[in-house]
Amino acid sequence: MTHDRDLDRVLDRWMDDGPTVVADRVIATAMTDVHTTRQRGARRALLKELFMTMKPTMTVLGIAAAAVVALAAFQILSGGGIGGPRTIAAEDLVDIVIAPGEQPSGMGHDSTYDDERILLRPIISVTGTAAIDPYLEQPGFVAGRYTEFSDDMTGLLSWAALFETPEDAQRSLALYVEEVQSDDGYGLDNQVEADLGDEGAFYDSSDPTNETLVILWRNGNAVLAAGTFGPFDPDVLRSLAQQMDAAAD
Amino acid sequence: MDDDLVSRARRGDESAFAEIAYGIGDRLFTVAQRILRDIDLAEDATQQAIVAIWRELPGLRDPARFEAWSYRVLVNACYAQARAERRWSPSLHVLETDHGAGDPQLSVADRDQLDRGFRRLPPEQRAVLVLQHYLDLTLPQIAETLGVPIGTVRSRLHYARRAMRAALEADARPALSGSRPS
């Protein structure tokens, strides 16, 4: 017990050391980003307040109007209205991205994401919040899926983002290629064309201490990636990427 | 935190939120720095947390829970910073420690050992140690803040404390040298 109390005292004192005041520029930068960031669910909260103050008949009319708008939006998004046909659908993503249980043996499943955050998952160069908008606000983004696996030495990511049109996907691919190649990002300066989808490449680094490998490609209206860090066999990564591409075809 | 300010910010009032952000900035940064042990990463986590707090605020049902909720958002931002740094960075940051400052009752050697031991902990274990020893939260409060069961908090604390004790006792030094009452 005394030993425990000693440890508590040491940890208490040690935690008290360190800075206690944040630089003003940190909050100022955050507030600049806040100015251009939409609140999630704000419209729903406003609608809720609106419904609470409306008379019952108005509420019924409001719900009916909302249902009409929702039906129209569904028809447009499902291809029944304007917009070109999509070669890959959102429900296909679960089969395209490496699923838990399909990873190389010995690796554990760490996480799966399937909301808009997937657009940011492969990004490592962005440390300030101002720079995330180009990734989060990508035109035509429909859905995505990201899975991550690791063992003691290596990690593996499998990622796919689906867009309304192949042109949207092409624009997105360029964003991620820049991230993979830039010094602030993955710093992968070698690029070899990958025989996957419509366009894409295998990226690695000429710096032997950088053991990151990424295959990034586009298949129709989807952008796909498979990446690893640590001492991972490139052929295994290629084979996983081929498996993903075959599922996307 | 003033509930009225939080309610106004929930409805999209940026000036109310600015008041909140400047009010909580120091404590968010202080906690982030304790978890990440790096000023640059802590500043990034603080910025991200403030923007995330603004973005997600309409989803906070009870303004009275703002403080605990804001810590949860911050801790998640710290996890993201720590993971990005550890997983995808080809070379790990060399983190500086200012040995000239700090509690004189802790020896430089102890601080070094604590620092090394702490950096080896996964971010989830770091967070529970900071919430317990820096914010003085109880186990149920930590569980509520992090949104995990108390058993999980207990287990994370157990492993974290064991690792920190081992770090202090490394190199066959007398445990907690210089800090035990004689």
Image (cartoon, coloured by chain):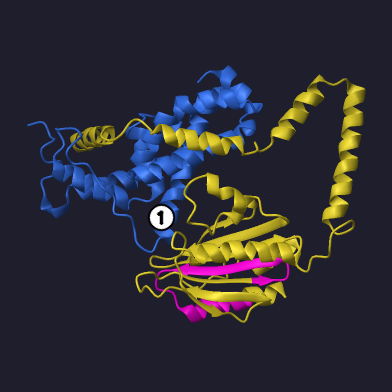
**Can the viewer see residue B50 in this picture?**
no
Q: Callout 1, which amino acid?
A: Glu
Looking at the image, residue A9 sits to the left or right of residue A109; the answer is left
In the image, residue B82 lies at what x, y percent?
Answer: 41, 50
Residue shown at the point (74%, 67%) measured from the top left: A166
**Can the viewer see residue B176 in this picture?**
yes
Q: On the rendered image, what quadrant is the N terminus of chain A found in?
A: top left
- For residue B32, above or below residue B9: below
Residue shown at the point (49%, 37%) measured from the top left: A29
Residue assigned mark 1: B85
SS under mark 1: helix
Looking at the image, residue B140 sits to the left or right of residue A198; the answer is left
In the image, residue A67 lies at what x, y percent?
Answer: 88, 40
> Residue A223 sits in which quadrant?
bottom right
State yes or no: residue A230 in magenta.
Answer: yes
Chain letter matching colour yellow: A
Chain letter matching colour blue: B
- For residue A150, above or below residue A237: above
Point out the stretch of residues depicted in magenta.
A218-243
State yes or no: residue B83 in magenta.
Answer: no
Residue shown at the point (44%, 69%) measured from the top left: A212
Q: On the rendered image, what quadrant is the C terminus of chain A found in?
A: bottom right
In the image, residue B170 lies at what x, y percent?
Answer: 17, 52
Residue shown at the point (63%, 73%) measured from the top left: A244
